[in-house]
Amino acid sequence: MGVGMQQQATLPATAQAIADVIGIEKTMELVRGKQQDKCRNIYVPAPSRMRASHWLIQTIGEDAARELAAEYAGEPLSIPKCSGLIKQQRNRQIIQMRCEGLTHLEIARAMGMSVSSVKTVYYRWLKAQN
């Protein structure tokens, strides 16, 4: 099982179904695009009704948006938060940045986190390596 498949297996069922159509990367772009919205429900129009200015095309690109529309046209979809996978990706980025030599403060500023949170992620990872 590849990394993408392992990540997809950790997604909620709705996100897994979407990833089956547009792939995990585009699914996560869609999740992040809805992250700030209070309403996580979307209506997917038919491909023929989707214009270049449609938010779905702006969020995940035309090809993925049209693939999603071909599969789910006319259906409402509830986009899950995928908090666990987002946190895993964030933690991997923190560890990578630290391994590249960035300080905890630099990482915290770049990630919009507190220094103590960055340290916690990094030191938990270090402890798990031993």
Image (cartoon, rainbow, N blue to C red):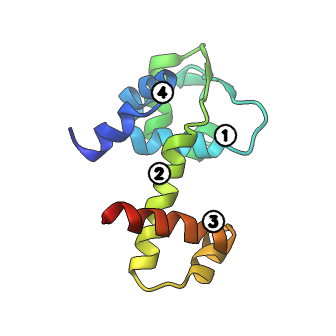
The residue tagged 3 is 117
Amino acid type at image mark 3? Ser
Around disc 3, counting alpha carbons within 10 Å, would you say few (fewer than 14), some (14 to 19), or many (20 or more)?
Answer: few
Residue 62 visible in rendering: no
Q: Which residue is mark 1?
A: 34
Amino acid carrying mark 1 in the image: Lys
N-term-proximal mark, 1 vs 4 = 1
| Residue at 44% across, 69% down | 95
Q: Are marks 4 and 3 in contact (CB under 8 Å)?
A: no
Callouts 2 and 1 close, C-beta under 8 Å: no
Quick one: which residue is furthest to the right in this view?
Answer: 38
Quadrant hosting residue 37: top right
Pointer 4 residue: 68
Mark 2 element type: helix
Q: Amino acid at mark 2?
A: Gln
**Dot in front, 1 or 4:** 1
Query: Pointer 2: what residue?
Result: 88
Q: Secondary structure at mark 4?
A: helix
Of circles 3 and 2, which is in front? 3
Q: Quadrant of the N terminus?
A: top left
Q: Earlier in the sequence, mark 2 or mark 1?
A: 1
